[in-house]
Structures are given as C-alpha cells and as structure tokens.
C-alpha cells in the first residue's frame, strides 16, 4: 500500500511538471487556429492575449518545475550530498582542534 501511495505521489508531481508544457502546446494550437505564422511575431486580431499566455507559462515554469523536481527525488539527492559534505567538514574540523584526534 505504501508503494502504491508513493507511485501516486510520483505521478502527481510528474503531472504538475507537465502543466507549463501543456499550456505551451495549447498556446501553439491557439496561434495556429487564429492564423499566426509558425515563426515570428503575430499581428492578427486575437493575438493580444498571447503575451499574457507567455507570461503565465514562464511564471508557472519558474515556480512549478523546481518544486516538482524537488518532490520527484531531488530532495533525497540533496540530502545525500548534504550528509556527505557535513561528514567531510566534521572530519576535517576535528583534526584542527587542539585536542588529540581520537576516532571512535
């Protein structure tokens, strides 16, 4: 049951990770439907809201992608790196003390 819960959480954050990409695809479909060229600026009626769409997509990507990556497993990798660095710093700092180095 715990494995199923973990899989559901992982799929949830994978879905959240896809939201900005899905909105970008929706924006491209809208651009095609109103007759915008594939590359370059679009000056057809109805294209005024595309800048708002771009701002929304960029904002969501900047917020959701780091959060999703963190919950998809980066927090465990970050914890392992933090633990490794802490052990390395603790080991080197105990050598510089005036007390003799004793390994337990």
Image (cartoon, rainbow, N blue to C red):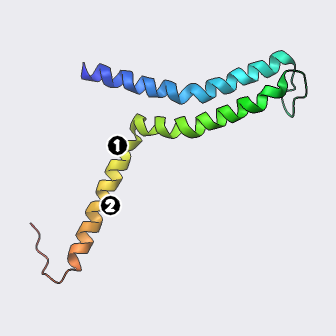
Vertical position of residue 61 compared to residue 48: above or below: below
Q: Earlier in the sequence, mark 1 or mark 2?
A: 1
Q: Secondary structure at mark 2?
A: helix
Give how far across and how far down residue 46 sits, in percent.
Answer: 85, 21
9 sits to left or right of 37: left
Question: Looking at the image, do the residues carrying marks 1 and 2 touch, with CB atoms under 8 Å apart?
Answer: no
Q: How many marks?
A: 2
For the C terminus, the image quarter is bottom left
Give how far across and how far down residue 44 sits, in percent.
Answer: 90, 23
For the N terminus, the image quarter is top left
Q: Tell me what residue is drawn at x 24 percent, y 80 percent.
A: 96
Sort mark 2 into few (<14), some (14-19) or many (20+) by Cα contacts within 10 Å. Answer: few
Residue lying furthest bottom = 98
Vertical position of residue 80 compared to residue 5: above or below: below
- Gap between marks 1 and 2 measured at Cα: 14 Å
Residue 76 circle label: 1
Give how far across and how far down residue 85 sits, in percent.
Answer: 32, 60
Q: Tell me what residue is drawn at x 31 percent, y 21 percent.
A: 5
Q: Secondary structure at mark 1?
A: helix
Vertical position of residue 26 compared to residue 84: above or below: above
Residue lying furthest top = 33
Image quadrant assignment for residue 53: top right
The residue that disc 2 covers is 85
Q: Tell me what residue is drawn at x 62 percent, y 37 percent.
A: 59
Give how far across and how far down residue 37 sits, in percent.
Answer: 87, 26
């Amino acid at each position: 049951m715990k494995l199923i819960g973990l899989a559901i959480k992982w799929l949830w954050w994978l879905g959240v990770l896809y939201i900005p990409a899905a909105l970008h695809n929706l924006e491209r479909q809208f651009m095609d439907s109103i007759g915008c060229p594939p590359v370059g600026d679009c000056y057809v009626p109805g294209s005024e809201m595309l800048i708002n769409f771009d701002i929304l997509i960029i904002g969501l990507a900047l917020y959701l992608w780091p959060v999703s990556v963190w919950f998809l497993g980066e927090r465990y990798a970050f914890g392992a790196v933090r633990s490794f660095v802490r052990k390395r710093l603790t080991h080197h700092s105990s050598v510089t003390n005036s007390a003799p180095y004793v390994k337990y």
